[in-house]
Amino acid sequence: MIQLGELASPDGAQHVDLGMARHTLEILIVLEDKTRGNLTGEEERVLHHVVNDLRGRYAAKLGK
């Protein structure tokens, strides 16, 4: 959310860094794939929700 400019960073600055946002999203997608079947149902739901939410917000920033 910070990299998408939707939240201020701890130092109070607010800026968009789509390259880092994409990188973070890709890491979360890999984490979701690698942990599939090894998390509790609640953990899987939370991770899936976070990935989908961030994916949608990222796409919106790109204008897609």
Image: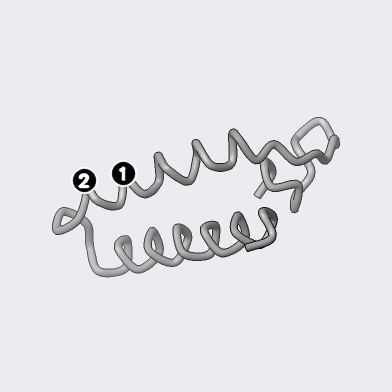
Q: Position of residue 54 (x, y in %)?
A: 55, 57
Residue drawn at point x = 53 percent, y = 64 percent: 53
Q: Is residue 9 above or below residue 59?
A: above
Which quadrant: the C terminus?
A: bottom right
In the figure, residue 34 lies in which quadrant? top left
Q: Residues within 10 Å of mark 2 (few under 14, many from 20)?
A: few
Q: Position of residue 26 (x, y in %)?
A: 42, 43
Q: Residues under labels 2 and 1: Cα distance?
A: 6 Å
| Disc 1 target residue | 30
Residue 15: which disc? none
Give the residue type that dot 2 points to: Lys
Q: Position of residue 12 (x, y in %)?
A: 85, 36
Q: Position of residue 49 (x, y in %)?
A: 44, 66
Give the residue type that dot 1 points to: Val
Q: Is residue 63 above or below residue 45?
A: above
Q: Are marks 2 and 1 in contact (CB under 8 Å)?
A: yes
Q: Is residue 17 above or below residue 47?
A: above
Determine the secondary structure under disc 2. helix
User: Which residue reaches farthest top?
Assistant: 11
Q: Camera-side residue: 47 or 63? A: 63
Residue 34: which disc? 2
Q: Residues within 10 Å of mark 1 (few under 14, many from 20)?
A: few
Instruction: Tell me: 16 left or right of 48.
Output: right
Residue drawn at point x = 60 percent, y = 35 percent: 19
Instruction: Tell me: 54 left or right of 52.
Output: right
Residue drawn at point x = 48 percent, y = 60 percent: 50
